[in-house]
Amino acid sequence: MIRLKSKEADLKRTYTRDLWTAVGLVVLVLAAVVAIDPQIAFDARIPAPRPATIELELVPATEQRRPLPRPPLQRVESVASVVDAPPVPVREHKLPRPVVATEFPLAEEVEAAELWMVEQPPKVLKKVLPAYPDSARKAQVEGKVFARVLVGRKGQVAHIDRIEGPQVFQRAVAQAAKAWEFAPAVQNDRPVPVWVSLPFVFELE
């Protein structure tokens, strides 16, 4: 069965009529509104302002440097004028006397212990003080001298290893150190040789 298109459904034919009908309705509505309230006013819609984002870029501070002033030119003297100048006097300063160490090597190797290694250290029985040298007394020289000696099994000074101190006192210290006498050191209930350091102080009255 073939159906024909209705004339009412044709939009091209009803377009003009619908347009004027809508325009007429709008005019009537506006006229009614104006008649009811002649002072009516429509406010324009203003959109809310959006917050603006500002990005700041950190720029490093710049420093302006001034060039350093150039040093003034110095006058260069000739070699002849420097050579002919009088010499500068040099003052002599008295330096402290250096500590001299005199060693006395052993002719034969001796097995001896250090003082801290023995059970019973040696005890001094006879102490001899050195004589003050006349040359040191006249020169007003004072000082400290240390003599490292070997105390044998019989308690006598068997050898002088070295003497440290002003050289003017070393001969007197060597003579006095040889005359010292000790009770020998003991290790495992037997006397043993041991190295001992003897101090000597030279002071003027």
Image (cartoon, rainbow, N blue to C red):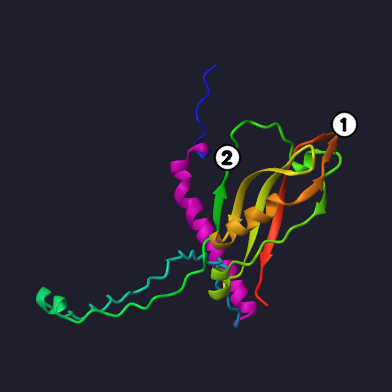
Q: What mark, if any, has residue 26 been given in the picture?
A: none
Q: Amino acid at mark 1?
A: Asn
State whether residue 179 appears in this view: yes
- Would you identify the image quadrant in which residue 68 lies? bottom left
Q: Which residue is mark 2?
A: 105
- Would you identify the image quadrant in which residue 158 lies? top right
Q: Amino acid at mark 2?
A: Pro
Instruction: From the top left corner, tell me how far across and down residue 137 is, in percent.
Output: 58, 73
Considering the whole magenta stretch, tell me its main secondary structure: helix
Q: Helix, strand or loop at disc 1?
A: loop
Which of the two discs, 2 and 1, labels the residue nearer the N terminus?
2
Disc 2, disc 1: CB below 8 Å?
no
Q: What mark, if any, has residue 188 been given in the picture?
A: 1
**Residue 18 is covered by the magenta coloring:** yes
Q: Is residue 40 above or below residue 6?
A: below
State whether residue 46 appears in this view: no
Instruction: From the top left corner, tell me how far across and down residue 156 is, in percent.
Output: 75, 44
As measured in the structure, the alpha-carbon distance from the residue carrying label 2 to the one carrying label 1 is 28 Å
Residue visible at 17% across and 81% down in the picture: 85
Instruction: From the top left corner, tell me how far across and down residue 187 is, in percent.
Output: 84, 34
Magenta residue span:
9-38
Q: Is residue 160 above or below residue 132?
A: above
